[in-house]
Image (cartoon, helix red, strand yellow):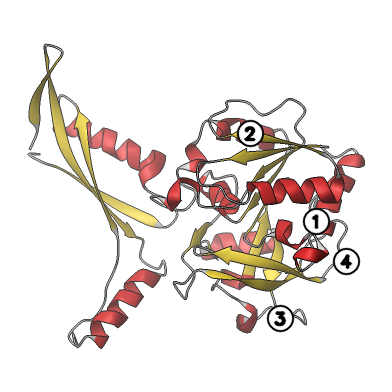
Amino acid sequence: MEENIVLRGETIMVHHVHVFIQLKDGVLDIQGKAVAHSLLSLGHSSLQSVKVGKYIQLWIESETAASAKEQASAMCDDLLVNGIIEQFRIEVEGE
Amino acid sequence: MKTAVVIFPGSNCDQDVIHAVRTTLGTEVAEVWHRENDLPSGTDLVILPGGFSYGDYLRSGAMAARSPVMKSVARHGGKGGLILGICNGFQVLTEARLLPGVLLPNRTLSFICRPCFLRVENTATPFTNRFPKGQVVQFPIAHGDGLYSLPEDELKALEDRGGVVFRYASPEGIADDNGNPNGSLNNIAGIISPEGNILGLMPHPERASEALLGGEDGCLFWQSILSFLEKGGR
């Protein structure tokens, strides 16, 4: 949910943004394989596959959810995601 | 020859590399903190040392690649200046897009710290001109994320242009899976930029530059750089 915060007498809107990062298809997910192996050895025999990714939460000041999403996307390009191996999906609460 | 060693929070091979350059070549070495905006004037060679910059947070090398000093490092490289990234420094160079590809977790998912044999594939570089082609050298490795990877078409382009400088191999120089410690594609241990001035490698030549420390194969590496610069290279 977006949240109205009063800061130095001004009301600003802060959006809670969720960024989900996964390895691109075809990139070897060694962690996923190791986790799958472990789960199978624990007896979870119906398990077919595991992918391990990252989940990052951001709180962004912005008038609209769309603009918060755009800013989050720029942050992914600048630092959060390595586009050679990773892909990402952004969700803004209340959008 | 003036060398600048960039130090990030979490670098831990900076003093080793400074020691190796000073003892092997006796040339000037400056330490540069990552928050500096400029490199010392007259810098010939920039070294990004090994370590765990920013605790490997997010991805190895990702945060360091965005440090203030990296803009100057990129400018130095853009003008043809020499840049060397060792281990974490190699990861920083790929994250900064100064070298192609990425370094993924080792295929064993374990941290590997041991001596390693490498075959010198390209000796027409500022970093390897004193080695005979195909020479097998022993440098240690110490990394968790050393599996070099890049898309198939780019891998082919890298190979075709002679961009692979070091390949993991057996002591006899056979670069097959047995000699591959971490699962790197094509046994790649070190690569160079298309312009031939930016080198990244996972093994540590600075830890093989003194007989007392177990080997001197790294000395030719430093001597290659000095010899390149003395012949008027930039």
- Looking at the rendered image, the disc whose residue lies closer to the viewer, 3 or 4, is 3
Query: Given the image, on which type of amino acid does mark 3 rest?
Result: Ser
Query: Mark 1 sits on what residue?
Result: B221
Say if B121 sits above or below B28 in the image.
below
Does label 2 or label 4 sit earlier along the sequence? 2
Q: Is residue B123 visible?
A: yes
Where residue B160 appears, x then y in whole percent? 69, 62
Where residue B191 appears, x then y in whole percent? 66, 57
Query: Given the image, on which type of amino acid does mark 1 rest?
Result: Phe
Is label 3 in contact with label 1 (beta carbons under 8 Å)?
no
Looking at the image, residue B158 sits to the left or right of residue A30; the answer is right
Query: Mark 2 sits on what residue?
Result: B32
Is label 4 in contact with label 1 (beta carbons under 8 Å)?
no
Q: Chain of mark 1?
A: B
Label 2: few (<14), some (14–19) or many (≥20) C-alpha neighbours in 10 Å: some
Q: Identify the secondary structure beneath mark 3.
A: loop
Query: Mark 4 sits on what residue?
Result: B132
Where residue B172 appears, x then y in whole percent? 78, 82
Q: CA distance from mark 3 to mark 4?
A: 17 Å
- Quarter assignment of residue A32: bottom left
